[in-house]
Image (cartoon, grey):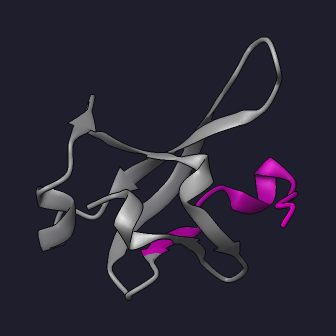
């Protein structure tokens, strides 16, 4: 499945896991400079989430590998197994 969207459309989208945990909001992306491919999503974490509190953050931001994305629509959906 190919997942193309304009970056502007993704900014501020809420990020959820496949089982309904709210991780936070999409704020940026990490791109491979050589290939131009999306490597990971950078998320402003939901500080009230018990799941997020157990995940590693860098500089107060949560990074999730792009291959963990299962769907993008009203929310960005992340496979729970890839983050916890």
| Residue 59 image point, x, y percent | 27, 28
Q: Is 66 drawn above or below residue 33 in the view shown? A: below
Direction from residue 21 to residue 9 in the image, left or right: right
Q: Is 29 drawn above or below residue 4 in the view shown? A: above
Span highlighted in magenta in the image? 1-16
| Residue found at x 40% / y 59% | 82
| Residue 26 image point, x, y percent | 54, 55
Q: How many marks?
A: 0
Q: Is 3 drawn above or below residue 33 in the view shown? A: below
Direction from residue 39 to residue 37 in the image, left or right: right
Query: Is 6 one of the magenta-colored residues?
Result: yes
Direction from residue 20 to residue 69 in the image, left or right: right
| Residue 84 image point, x, y percent | 26, 61
Residue at the farthest top position: 34
| Residue found at x 32% / y 80% | 21
Q: Is 48 drawn above or below residue 45 in the view shown? A: below
Residue at the farthest bottom position: 20
| Residue 50 image point, x, y percent | 12, 71
| Residue found at x 84% / y 67% | 1
In depth, the one of 14 and 19 nearer the eye is 19
């Amino acid at each position: 499945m190919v997942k193309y969207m304009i970056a502007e459309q993704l900014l501020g989208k809420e990020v959820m896991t496949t089982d309904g945990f709210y991780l936070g909001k999409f704020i940026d992306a990490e791109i491979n400079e050589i290939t131009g491919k999306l490597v990971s999503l950078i998320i402003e974490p939901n500080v009230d989430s018990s799941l997020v509190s157990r995940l590693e953050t860098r500089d107060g931001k949560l990074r999730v590998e792009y291959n963990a994305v299962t769907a993008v629509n009203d929310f960005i959906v992340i496979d729970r197994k890839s983050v916890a």
